[in-house]
Amino acid sequence: MIIFGVAFLALCTLTGIFVGELLGKAIGVPANVGGVGIAMVLLILIGSYLKKRGLFNPESEQGIKFWSAVYIPIVVAMAAQQNVYGALSGGPMAILAGVAAVALAFMLVPVLDRIGRKKLEADPTLPADPAKPLTSSARG
Amino acid sequence: MYESLMKVISGYGLISGFAIIGATMWLSYWLSDKLTKGRLHGSAVAILIGLLLSYIGGVVTGGQKGLVDIALFSGIGLLGGAMLRDFAIVATGFGVSVDELKRAGMVGVLALFIGVLASFVAGVAVAFAFGYTDAVSLTTIGTGAVTYIVGPVTGAAIGASSEVMALSIAAGLVKAIVVMVATPFVAPYIGLNNPRSAVIFGGLIGTSSGVAGGLAATDPKLVPYGCLTAAFYTALGCLLGPSLLFFVMRGLLG
């Protein structure tokens, strides 16, 4: 039944976010520590275990796939309620600070990608990726 | 008749949200096809339209929630709120390959630390250039560039002025919005086309709404990988902001 998939997704989400809240309390951070990430890991691990044992039929999967498919419309709805006006009325310093942070992070993506990749290629137990050429423009 | 229509639209808010967003998606895919021959992905167009509408909503109402502040569109707030957003993000995890995750695991953690630090440094540098010289203001604005949650959390902890807090939130909002808009354009140049780089991207950028939107507009298959690392970013920022980063700034400025 489709509801089994939805319920399974709901349980994983609630558990993950609950654990995230507890972790936040434990280390004294007023934020959820990785709740969504933990929920995803639960979904991936328990989901693949159930699938292997044949306890997860394609119909139940539909319950998860539906929510995964409405993800983009939900993100569009999320975009429509960002405080764009507030962000831009923060003035040039706020805009520049935000843009600078993003630009720096974008530039670091290929740098970090390379750091890990060398180790991967040196590790014979892992299949080497068909090395994807790094674009030089990314450095500038 | 008008009153009855309004009653239905606002009374059935979530359903109206589905209808309005569905229509926006259709229009966006049509525009993407006709105007850009599909080069700019339909979902990227939809996100751009969403941001534009939220700007208009902000100008019209002066509120903080963009389009949602207009009563007619309040249902979009339900659809795009934290609850359904997180539910759908977790659902995208169903397509994740465990092997890909394992291979990106360590560098993903590294990306988190470097990401928080890099955004902080960028924010501090800009604030410094604009004439701020005290450790409290610089730290608050710098952590705002981490995310718009970390900024006010840090600012409140170290006693920043409300003007500086507002700037810090604005910097974080700009970051989230820029990520949503720019990611699909920048992706080809930074090699953002595989799960590994998506994990790194999520860790470096962090802001959950930015990563969720930016990756959705680039390639929906990459969403779960990026969101997995991004989920830890704000917490790491809240942990480091009022402690290590503030102490370092205070040490540097005497």
Image (cartoon, coloured by chain):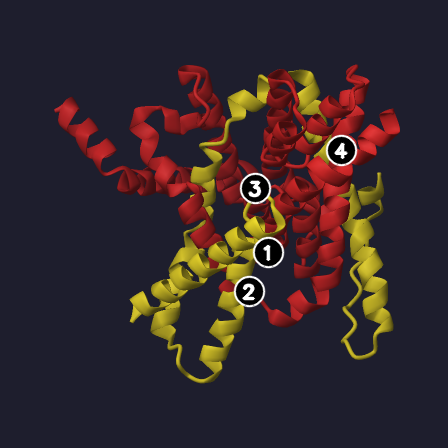
Describe residue B105's horizontal placement relative to residue B149 as left or right: right
Instruction: Return the mark for residue A30.
Output: 3
Classify mark 3: helix, strand or loop.
loop
Q: Nearer the viewer, residue B254 or A47?
A: B254
| Disc nearer the start of the sequence (1/4) | 1
Classify mark 1: helix, strand or loop.
helix
Q: Report the Cα–Cα distance between label 2 and label 3.
A: 22 Å
Identify residue for label 4: B246
Q: Residues within 10 Å of mark 4 (few under 14, many from 20)?
A: many
In the rendered image, residue B51, in percent from the top left (x then y), is placed at: 50, 30
Q: Report the Cα–Cα distance between label 1 and label 4.
A: 27 Å
Q: Nearer the viewer, residue B162 or A86?
A: B162
- Amino acid on which the number 3 mark rests in the picture: Pro
**Above or below: residue B112 compared with residue B182:** below
Q: Do the residues labelled 4 and 3 touch (CB within 8 Å)?
A: no
- Amino acid on which the number 2 mark rests in the picture: Val
Q: Chain A is drawn in which colour?
A: yellow
Instruction: Return the mark for residue B228.
Output: 1
